[in-house]
Image (cartoon, rainbow, N blue to C red):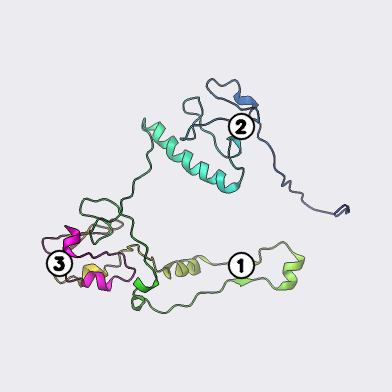
Amino acid sequence: TGELEEIEADDLILALGQDTDTGFLKGVGGVEVKEDGTVVVSPQMMTGAPGVFAGGDMVPSERTVTIAVGHGKKAARNIDAWLRGETYVKPRHTQPNGGMAARSNTGETTVPRIADFEKLHLWFYTEAMKRPQGHLEMLQRRTTFDEVLKGLSPSEASYEAKRCLSCGNCFECDGCYGACPEDAIVKLGPGLRYQYNYDLCTGCAICFEQCPCHAIELLPEEDFR
């Protein structure tokens, strides 16, 4: 604005974009440093020196917190694989090929199709209104740097998480397991969901109709074959 103002402060936090100092890496064999000071890395986030990984502001990329966090997650997976003498390969998800369960008989993890509002059986859930978060009064907002929203307590956050409809994703409610009249559904254990015994299944579709989040796909027999 062209106007200057002096104010008193107890703490001063420097929040300016800065370059990284990568000069100390120039003597490391295999590490390639570009003219702008960034370090060249492979798709696995590893530099030219085996076992030396880099990310965030140090590599050619967008310099944002989000990108840096993503680099950290990606590098961690590749570092773990490198220490094991392996190469990290991103898990491949397969689309449902006619089976009814979110986990096929072969154990492959499948990606459920998108479940829109019409496919959700909301009768399965009790009515639970969203809990409002506490907030500071307007006067406090103007005179302090305190957080405006007070957030949720651990118990409140847990309650809110349980309100999720898990659209299209099996959350192991055991509804299909309990509804099947032929005992064709086998529980695989916590986190492993279910397996279908097609020798016992008669195609009655009871499991499909009662599933609250449309995690089960049912196709005509000719399409399944």
Look at discs 1 and 3 and give the one toward the viewer.
3
In magenta segment, residue 222:
yes
Residue drawn 39% across the image and 72% down it: 117
* Residue that numbered label 3 is attached to: 183
Mark 3 crowdedness (10 Å alpha carbons): few <14, some 14-19, many ≥20:
some
Report the disc number at residue 38: 2
Query: Label 1 sits on what residue type?
Result: Lys
Q: Against 172, is 38 above or below?
A: above
- Kind of residue at disc 3: Asp
Residue 155 picture location, percent across and down? 48, 68
N-term-proximal mark, 2 vs 1: 2
In percent of width and height, residue 198 lies at 14, 60
Please, what is the three-letter code of the amino acid marked with disc 2? Answer: Thr
Residue 203 position, x and y percent, is 16, 68
Residue at the (56%, 74%) spot, across then down: 132
Boundaries of the magenta span: 198-225
> Under tag 2, what secondary structure?
loop
- Magenta span contains residue 210: yes
Q: How packed is label 2: few (under 14 Cα within 10 Å), some, or many (20 or more)? A: many
Of badges 3 and 2, nearer the viewer stands 2
